[in-house]
Amino acid sequence: MKDNIRIALAQFGKAAMAGGVLVLAAAFFYLVLTPKSYQAGTKIKLEQRDWISTNKLHNPYDPRIVPPEYELIRSDAILSKAIENLHLAETWGKRYQQGVSLKTNESLALLRTKTRISVLPQSTVMQVQVNSENPDETAAIANEIARVYREQRETERKVATSDKVASLKKEWEEQSRKLSQAEDNLKKLRFDISMSRITNSAMVYDAQGLEFLQRKRVQLQSDYVREDNVLKQLKSLDHEKLRQVLPTMTTNQFLNSLLDKLSEAESELNFSKTNTAPDSVQTRHAATAVSELNKRVDSTLDAFLTQKTAELDSTKAELEKAVDMLKNAHTATNAANPQDAVFAQAVQEVQTLKTENDNLKEKLDATSIDAVMPTAVSAEILTPAETPSEPFSPNRSAATKTMCVAGGLILLGLLTKLFTFKIKRVTPPPASLN
C-alpha cells in the first residue's frame, strides 16, 4: 500500500516538474519572441449644448448624438488629415518601405490597423486607442485624431451659425424694405389728407361723427399723458432697474427669454466657480455666456426705449390732428363729407401697419434666438493620451505571474520527489517467508 502511494507521489512530482518547466519555457519565449507593442488612448466627451447658454452642460446620456459623431471621427477625412499633419506617410515609408513614402490609401489602411475607436457603454464618451511599436507615436496619433475631429466639429458649428445669420439678415432686409414702403405710402396718404384739409377748412360732420371725434381727442390726450409719464420714468432708470421693471410692464417674449437665459447662465457661472477651478472649461463657457447675454439685454432695453419714444411721437401726431380737425369741424344734418372715407382709410392703414409690425417683430425675435443660439454637438477631450512607459504587448505582468506559477510547480515537484525519497529510505524491506 505504501509503495503504491510512493509511486503515485513520484509520478505526480515528475508531472509537476515537467509542467512547470514547459510553462516556464513558454512564458520565457513569449517575453523574448513577442514583438513589443505600445498603446495610448484618449477620451472625448460629446455634449449637446447651446452656443451661448450653458445650462445644457450636464445633460443625461443621449444616444442619438453618438452614431453620426462616431462615423465622423473614424472617417477618411479625419484620419487623412491626421496622417498629413503628422507626416505619417513619410515616417512609415522609412520604417516599412525602405524610404519610399506610402500612398494615401496605404497610409489609411495601416492607420486603421493601428487604431481602435469605440464608444464607452451607456455614455457619450468616445475612446481612441492607438497601438504601435513606437511609444511616442501612439500618443501623438491618438491626440492628433482627437484634435482634428474637435476642430472639424467646431468648424462645422461656425459654418452652420454663419448660414443662419446670413439667412436672418436676408429676411430682415426684405421685410425692412416692405415696411419702409408701407410707411412711405402712409406718409403720402397723411399728406394728401392734410392738403385736403387745408383746401377745405370747414369739415362737416353729423352729430354722431362729431361726438366720435371729440371722444377720440379726449382718448388721445389721455394716452399721450400716460405714455409720456411712463417714458420719462423709464428713461430715469438705469439698465439694472429696467431689467426688474420691464418684465412686469410688457409681454415682450424676446426680452423675457433673454432675461431667463441670463438668470440660468449666472446660476451656471456660480455653480462652476463653486465646484470647478476658476480657469476650467465650464467656468470660461459660463463667463462668456453671462457677458454676451448682458450685452444683448442692454441692447434690447435701449431698443425698447427707442420704440416707446416712437410710439409717443405717433400718439402726439394723432392728437394734434384730432385737435386741428375739431377747430374747423361743425355739424350739418344732411351734409356728407368725402374726407370721412379718406380718414377711415388712413385709420385702417395705421392699424394694418401696426399689425404687420407686431407680426414682423414676433417673427424676427424667434428667428434671432434660433440664429444666434444654435444647438450643436460640443466635443471636449477628457483625458489626452500620454506616451506609455511600458509595452502593452508582451504583457509583462501576466508573463511574470505565469513564470511564478511555473516556478511553484517545479518547486512542488521537487518537494514531492524529496518526500518520496525519504519514504523509500524509512520503509523497511518486506519480511522473509522462511
Image (cartoon, rainbow, N blue to C red):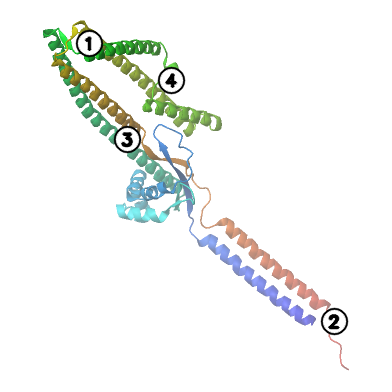
Q: Position of residue 69 (x, y in %)?
A: 39, 47
Question: Mark 2 sits on what residue?
Answer: 428
Residue 383 visible at all: no
Nearer the camera: disc 1 or disc 2: 1
Counting residues from the start of the chain, the first of labels 1 and 2 encountered is 1
Q: Could you tell me how far apart the alpha carbons at marks 4 and 3 are, in whole angstroms?
A: 28 Å
Nearer the camera: disc 4 or disc 1: 1
Q: Is residue 91 left or right of residue 36?
A: left
Q: Residue furthest bottom?
A: 434
Question: Mark 1 sits on what residue?
Answer: 321
Number of other residues with Cα within 10 Å of mark 1, as a class: few under 14, some 14 to 19, many 20 or more: few
Q: Could you tell me how far apart the alpha carbons at marks 1 and 2 are, in whole angstroms?
A: 141 Å
Question: Mark 4 sits on what residue?
Answer: 243
For the point 86% across and 88% down, which residue is it? 431
Q: Is residue 227 left or right of residue 331?
A: right
Q: Is residue 419 left or right of residue 398?
A: right
Quadrant of the frame with the C terminus: bottom right
The amino acid on which the numbered mark 1 sits, given as a three-letter code, is: Lys
Quadrant of the frame with the N terminus: bottom right
Q: Position of residue 377 (x, y in %)?
A: 39, 41
